[in-house]
Each structure stands twice: as C-alpha cells, then as structure tokens.
C-alpha cells in the first residue's frame, strides 16, 4: 500500500497555516510508522502506485482524485464544521445564513471514503450520521514546537477581528496593559512559522470564538500552538474540550473583564501559570500525534 499526502491550496488563512503544518507532521509520522508515503501539493503526485490520497478539506474534490486513478481512495484530515450538541447543526448554521454551505459540504463529505476530523464534536456528529469518520486527536509533534524563544510578550491574540472578538479585545486594551499584541495580519495568519514564533514568545494566548454561537474547541490554536509551546491558554467556554480541564490545562473565561482579571492574575503569579502550562505540555506528550494517527488509521482500516 502506498499513501499520497497532498496539501493542495486553500484561500482561508487559518486553514492554509494549520493545514500545511499538520500535513507535513502527518507525512513525517507516516514515515516513522514505516508507511510507503509521498508528499506534495498537486494531484500529479497520484499515479498507478497510489492506493490512498489524504487531502485537506475542499482543496480537491474526491472526483478529481479518482479522476486521476479510479482505484485511489480519498480520505480527509481537517476540521469539517463546528456542530452544536444534540445534533442541532442545521439550525445552528441557518442562524448565519450558510445553510447552502452546509448542504454542499455534506454532499462533499458523502463522496469521501473516510474522514479524520480534528474536532471531536464534528467527528461524533458525522459518525452518528452514518459517515466513515473518526476523531484524530491532536498531540505532540516536534515540528509544532519552538523552544528556542524567550517569552518576552505578555498577551497574544492572532485572528480575524469579528464583532464578539473586538468587544473582548477592546475591554482588555482599555486597561492599557503593557506587553499586549493583537493582530489580524494575514501574512502572520497564513504563515505557520511566524504564527508559531508569536505564540512561543508569549506567556498567554487568547482563544475567543469567532461568533457567540460557535463555541467549538479550536484544537489547532489551543493544542498545536499553545500547549506545545508552553503558552497559557485563556479561552471562552468550548464544547467538546476533549480530556482538557479548566484550571488544570487551560483557563476558561467569561466576558472581557473576566479575561482582563485573569490575565492580571496569571502574569502576577508565574508559579501557578507554570503549573498549568506544564500540565498541558505533559498531557499532549502522553498522546503524541504519531500514535493518535496510528489509531485513527487503524479505525478507518487503512493500517492493521
């Protein structure tokens, strides 16, 4: 069996950044598992020897992959969508006027041979809906970490400045805290190395939901960047927080004032901050990405 890991292209900055990072890590993990694997950005990589293609969501369609070689099976790694509990996904997506996107994406998913979803909630929803889906839990990989940088920045937020995010960030900024860096610069958001460096040099990183009714667990921001680089995560409440606990691995916050007060507390109590950061780092090291990937591939019957 031979696997092609194909990253493709996507115009979403976050997907581009994390997609490239995760796919390179997956490629390296497969090599470590002694799998015959190749890596690239184009479907031209697929020839008669390729049995399985692993792709980024919507960078290619399964039909494009199978059009190259009809026997090649197509699997996806990524975040599909962000469901609410109790299967209310259609109603949830209708709130934002993207029901059409939801329907189109479900048609896309139905044509795949399998899905490794990085979000536990999405994986559970897809599996319960009859799709061949598993949760690929993000874990430690050396390529996610930059341990050579001093933590000379206090507080970091990187991402799109949506209205709910602006409200919280304004509250924090209004108190004129020093050592704060907030940015929506696309050059940073698209570049994995730059993004990782900003996280690695920060003591605290904020995870604020894009919209109030999108409380998904941003595993790529929280685990891949925050936990791995020993940066304390202050986050709004998330659904499906996996095995991570408030006060032990990360800190859950409420409104902008709550964020501000907890920022002050943890900057003034380094020992407590270090204890939580160390707990999170040890936790992901006990579930390395290579072993998580092996389990997901075995569940999908790609590996035995």
Image (cartoon, helix red, strand yellow):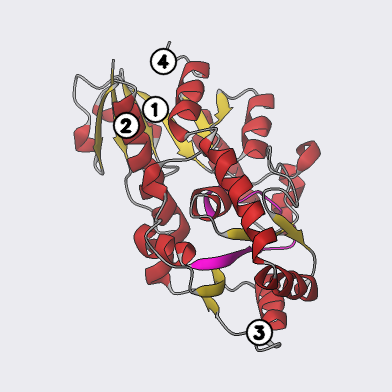
Q: Is residue 132 above or below residue 232?
A: above
Disc 1 to disc 3, C-alpha distance: 46 Å
- State the extent of the magenta-drawn residues as a range: 202-221
On the image, which quarter does residue 207 sit in? bottom right
Q: Secondary structure at mark 3?
A: helix
Check disc 2 and report the residue beneath it.
65
Across and down, in percent, residue 5 comes to 31, 34
Q: Which residue is mark 4?
A: 303
In this rendered view, identify the residue nearer to me: 109 or 284.
284
* Image quarter (top left, top right, bottom left or bottom right) of the N terminus: top left
Identify the mark nearer the N-term, 1 or 3: 1
Kindly identify which numbered label has been placed on residue 268.
none
Q: Is residue 203 magenta?
A: yes
The spot of residue 8 in percent (x, y) is: 32, 46
Q: Residues within 10 Å of mark 1 (few under 14, many from 20)?
A: many
Q: Kindly indicate whether the residue at mark 4 contacts the one at mark 3 (C-beta within 8 angstroms).
A: no
């Amino acid at each position: 069996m031979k696997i092609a890991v194909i990253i493709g292209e996507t115009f979403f900055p976050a997907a581009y950044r994390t997609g490239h990072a995760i796919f390179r890590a997956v490629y390296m993990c497969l090599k470590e598992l002694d799998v015959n694997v190749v890596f690239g950005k184009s479907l031209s990589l697929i020839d008669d020897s390729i049995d399985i293609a692993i792709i980024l969501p919507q960078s290619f369609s399964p039909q494009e992959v199978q059009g190259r070689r009809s026997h090649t099976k197509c699997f996806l790694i990524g975040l599909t969508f962000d469901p609410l509990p109790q299967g209310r996904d259609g109603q949830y997506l209708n709130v934002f006027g993207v029901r059409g996107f939801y329907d189109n994406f479900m048609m896309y998913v139905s044509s795949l041979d399998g899905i490794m979803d990085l979000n536990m909630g999405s994986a559970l929803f897809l599996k319960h809906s009859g799709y061949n889906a598993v949760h690929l839990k993000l874990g430690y990989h050396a390529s996610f970490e930059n341990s050579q940088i001093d933590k000379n920045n206090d507080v970091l937020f990187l991402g799109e400045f949506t209205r709910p995010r602006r409200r919280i960030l304004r509250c924090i900024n209004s108190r004129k805290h020093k050592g704060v860096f907030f940015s929506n610069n696309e050059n940073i958001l698209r570049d994995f190395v730059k993004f990782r460096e900003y996280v690695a040099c920060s003591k605290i990183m904020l995870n604020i939901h894009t919209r109030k009714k999108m409380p998904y667990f941003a595993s790529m921001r929280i685990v891949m960047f925050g936990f791995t680089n020993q940066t304390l995560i202050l986050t709004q409440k998330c659904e499906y927080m996996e095995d991570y606990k408030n006060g032990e691995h990360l800190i859950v916050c409420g409104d902008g004032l709550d964020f501000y007060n907890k920022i002050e507390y943890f900057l003034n109590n380094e020992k407590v901050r270090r204890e939580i950061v160390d707990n999170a780092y040890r936790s992901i090291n006990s579930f390395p990405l290579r072993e998580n990937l092996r389990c997901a591939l075995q569940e999908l019957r790609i590996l035995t």
